[in-house]
Amino acid sequence: MQKTIFITGASSGLGKATAILFQSKGWHVIATMRYPEKEMELKKLDNITLHELDVTNPKNIKDVVNKTISEHSVDVVLNNAGYGLIGPLEAFTDEQIARQIETNLMGPIRVTKSFIPYFREKKTGIFINITSMFGMIGYPTCSMYAASKFALDGFSESLAYDLSHFGVKVKIIAPGGIQTDFSGRSMDIATHDAYQGLIDKVSEGYNEESIKRYSTPEMVANAIFKAATDNNNQLRYIVGSDAEALYNERLNISPEGQYKKLREIFSF
């Protein structure tokens, strides 16, 4: 029987790569995005259904989920839509902060909540949430992005306990850097003169050579496919050599030890 995955943020980058991979594996893909009328590639593929979805709009979420479960048997929900708000906290407006939380945290929470009764009654289903290595490790100039991703990680782990009683799984994909347009279209950057030394220091780590070592969207999509099909209860999937190195370092020298090390690296 053909399986179905529901994906948010499927118009580009990781979301699109995941949609293409699952479609190639014989899945039916519900690919959601804010502007489906602009999507030219996915609409040409068989077994892909496009829906307009803005994860910051609660009514839109409810309507799309209700329509989807009335027409399809959904097996996996991938909460992928998100972006990075990068810079010192003083540089952000309240509107920017609210948008970051609404998109990266409240969006996945609302999508998940809308699907829970459906999965609970079926006694099966998988939620896969895209967090980040900065959802487990704080990093300079990433305070609001990390706030949204740390919260999503904690939400996912806690929810996994609750839903396990109904045969429903929650899984976390925590990638490092990804070679997508995340640093362009999917990033909101603000600066502040008082922090320019720190901003310059952090920027050194995003040079062309470093970006070449990041995971491709296809590599992360493969991890998502594994999480959706491996039939085990693994919670977190750390993806990318950079994420694995930071995560293993945290385990080996403790969070406090890693904090001290990063403070020394980013002193100026």
Image: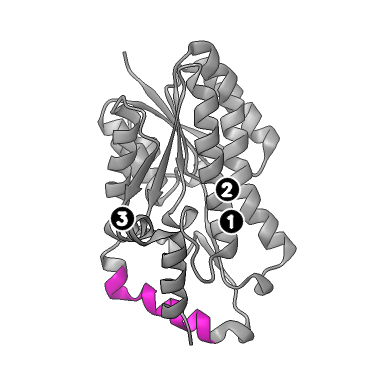
| Coordinates of residue 170 in the picture (x, y in percent) | 46, 31
Amino acid type, residue under disc 2 in the picture:
Ala
Q: CA distance from mark 2 to mark 3?
A: 20 Å
Which residue is label 1 attached to?
Answer: 147
Say whether disc 3 or disc 1 marks the residue closer to the N-terminus.
Answer: 1
Quarter of the view holding residue 231: top left
Judge whether residue 203 is colored magenta.
yes
| Location of the N terminus (image quadrant) | top left
Residue 129 placement (x, y as % from top left): 47, 40
First in residue order: circle 2 vs circle 3: 2
Q: Residue furthest right?
A: 94
Q: Give residue 151's mark.
A: 2
Q: Considering only vertical position in the picture, is 209 above or below 196? A: above
- Give SS at disc 3: helix
- In the visual, does 25 lie left or right of 151? left
Is there any visible trace of residue 35 in the rendered image?
Answer: no
Query: Horizontal and vertical percent for residue 186?
Result: 50, 59
Instruction: From the top left corner, tell me how far across and down residue 239 is, in percent.
Output: 32, 50
